[in-house]
Amino acid sequence: MLQGTGSDVGKSLLAAGLCRALARRGLKVRPFKPQNMSNNAAVTADGGEIGRAQALQARACFVAPASDMNPVLLKPQTDIGAQVVVQGKVLGNATARDYHALKPTLLPRVLESFRRLAAEADLVMVEGAGSAAEVNLRAADIANMGFAEAADVPVVLVADIDRGGVIASIVGTWELLPEAERARLKGYVINKFRGDPALFRPALDLIAERTGLACFGIVPWFPEAARLPAEDAASLRAGAGTGALRIAVPRLSRIANFDDFDPLAAEPDVRLSFVAPGSPIPADADLVILPGSKATVADLAFLREQGWDIDILAHARRGRPVLGICAGYQMLGRMVSDPLGVEGPAGGSAPGLGLLDVATEMAGDKVLAEVAGTDRAGRPVKGYEMHMGRTHGPDAARPFLTLAGTPDGAVSPDGRVMGCYLHGLFASDSFRAALLEGIRPGRDGGLAYEALVDQVLDRLADHLEAHLDVKALVDVAGI
């Protein structure tokens, strides 16, 4: 189990790279994260949902993602509350305090999922959440040492040197852990290193003197990590790329499934900008895309607070295209209503931007499905649906896509405003190339995005093989 000295130390990336490295050695490897908090989720073949990082790690293992790989997923809806997904299915909504009381009842299901995975694997690569030493949450912990103790799993600590204070983070974590939990720690990894490792040698000696822990390696900064799907919205950069074709994505307060945009960011002639709150949508944007959101009505209000509604309407008046994905599609319509309180207070509603003549009602079961189809020109597309709500109206008579033989989405009469429910749309190479060609004729295309992701996973595995004592890590696992 990889546990961190804090959040965003690189546990997910290290787990993915080790999964690929060990799978290439012929081991049957499965990823596992007991508890995850992210609005960047993936749909599994069995109709569940898990964190995007575990889906990437499954890909690194050359297997399909499964609900057991992330049995508890928390999807934040407010600053103090989240939707709770257990073994792929929505359990309900809970405040932070309510969820803390709920955790002990979830541990048996977490262990159930872990044991099913372990039964089919040579090795399970477990990823913790946040810090290993969150002593205020330890009593009901299912994410870090609480799980490791219940499942009897050895632990390797991951520390991020790039943020500074790495010596204190390792020694401080050790000092805060009780003796039984210290005994689970088999060593540590220094991640995101830049510079001369020889200069860090005295620090290794000091850490060994204070803790007795072994160092399994110092992992240099891996720039290509930016090409892999991110799990946390905090990792979104303001802009990616320096290309002439500019795409703007408003960074909503509950932005979800933002890995939708990774294929666009990978295009060498595209400059993708996540527009931060307080900043205007660039007037020179060639395309504005409204992303998914975990709270559509609330984020419509947030969008208006930023003045982005004015920017988007001005963009459309200039004759430039606007595209909405999932909640972004709903926002482009005339109205979004939530009579049952699916995402917030019952009876809540908000006018949309009115760029599409459709309306959405949050009702019915949550749609979770992998799906394939075609765009209006017959080009193949595939991805997944993950949404509440049903959208109807005159513009839906001009569907943007056809998925599994069923119309999806809508297009405005002039063809400039489009929306659909399909996440992962831009990973379809021919669709993406045609979309960008329509905006900027004569551009060079040809990027094979899915192949690129696997190439980066292989290079990440090579990187870790070169800088970590992988054999020692395998020995720790008892193989």
Image: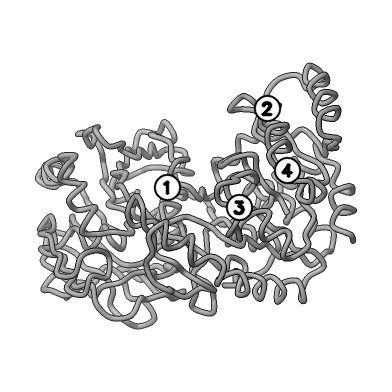
Q: Quadrant of residue 126?
A: bottom right
Task: Name above or below for residue 250 compared with residue 40.
Answer: above
- Give the amino acid at mark 2: Ala
Ranked by sequence position, the earlier of labels 3 and 2 is 3
Residue at 43% across, 74% down? 91
Graded by Cα atoms within 10 Å as few (under 14), some (14 to 19) or many (20 or more), the crowding at tag 3 reads: some
Q: Are marks 2 and 4 in contact (CB under 8 Å)?
A: no
Q: Position of residue 450 (x, y in %)?
A: 56, 57
Ranked by sequence position, the earlier of labels 2 and 1 is 2
Classify residue 172 as left or right of residue 375: right
Marks 2/1: CA distance?
39 Å
Mark 1 — residue? 264
Q: Quadrant of the N terminus?
A: bottom right
Q: Quadrant of the C terminus?
A: bottom right
Mark 3 — residue? 138
Mark 4 — residue? 157
Q: Nearer the viewer, mark 4 or mark 3?
A: 3
Q: Are marks 1 and 4 in contact (CB under 8 Å)?
A: no
Marks 2/4: CA distance?
13 Å
Q: Position of residue 253 (x, y in %)?
A: 31, 47
Ranked by sequence position, the earlier of labels 4 and 3 is 3
Task: Name above or below for residue 399 compared with residue 157.
Answer: below
Q: Are marks 4 and 3 in contact (CB under 8 Å)?
A: no
Task: Name above or below for residue 136 compared with residue 197.
Answer: below
